[in-house]
Image (cartoon, rainbow, N blue to C red):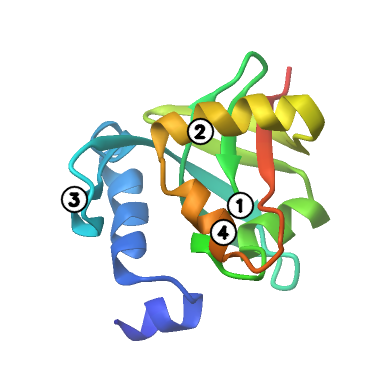
Amino acid sequence: MREQDKRAGRPSWMTEHIKLYQTDPEKAHLWDASALGVPARIPTLLLTTKGRKSGRDVFSPLIYTQSPTGFVVIASNGGAPEHPNWYRNLLASPVCDIQVGPQRYRVRARIAVGEDRATLWAKMMKTWPRYDSYQQRAKGRQIPLVVLEPQK
């Protein structure tokens, strides 16, 4: 793992995905997840939050699906017992930017709850079935489901 990746706390494949999104967003949009043992191309977006401590832009490539009001992402952190940094950044400042392929949006994040969460979780499971195993590994943490709604 490169030094930059260690400081950012992310695997090098994620850093490479961010770079690809910044240079060839159409190619990065449908992510080749074969490095993780998944043969399919998975739809991803690039989330840009403001670091709650640093104030700097923080980039996170995330698997997504669409909802009637926006884009849905899951704060799984691979099933770790703690929330990912990007999610904590959104809690501190819910207005952020996303890029979906070449399209850019200013969005407001909201946490899906109740029936809305259950419906969207099932939809996300069709995109990335590993989320159920991540939830099992999360040691009692309910993995948040976040809806990113474009601002008018």
- Separation (CA) of disc 2 from disc 4: 16 Å
Q: Nearer the viewer, residue 24 or 14?
A: 14
Q: Which residue is mark 3?
A: 34
Q: Mark 3 vs mark 4: which is more N-terminal? A: 3
The image shows residue 98 at horizontal and vertical percentages of 55, 37
Question: In what element is the residue under mark 4?
Answer: helix
Is 30 situated left or right of 57 in this image? left
The quadrant of the picture occupied by the C terminus is top right
Q: Are marks 2 and 4 in contact (CB under 8 Å)?
A: no
Measured along the vertical axis of the image, is residue 146 above or below residue 52? above
Q: Which residue is mark 4?
A: 136
Question: In what element is the residue under mark 3?
Answer: helix
Measured along the vertical axis of the image, is residue 9 above or below residue 50? below
Kindly identify which numbered label has been placed on residue 75: 1
Q: Total label count? A: 4
Mark 3 surroundings within 10 Å by alpha-carbon count, few (fewer than 14), some (14 through 19), many (20 or more): few
Mark 4 surroundings within 10 Å by alpha-carbon count, few (fewer than 14), some (14 through 19), many (20 or more): some
Q: Which residue is mark 2?
A: 124
- Marks 2 and 1: which is nearer the front? 2
Q: Residue 43 falls in which quadrant of the image? A: top left
The image shows residue 15 at horizontal and vertical percentages of 35, 63
Mark 1 surroundings within 10 Å by alpha-carbon count, few (fewer than 14), some (14 through 19), many (20 or more): many
The image shows residue 97 at horizontal and vertical percentages of 61, 39
- Separation (CA) of disc 3 from disc 2: 19 Å
Q: Residue at x 37, y 30 (%)?
A: 101
Q: Residue 6 falls in which quadrant of the image? A: bottom left
Q: Residue furthest bottom?
A: 3
- Separation (CA) of disc 1 from disc 3: 21 Å
Q: Mark 2 vs mark 4: which is more N-terminal? A: 2
- Give amino acid for label 2: Met
- Give amino acid for label 1: Ala
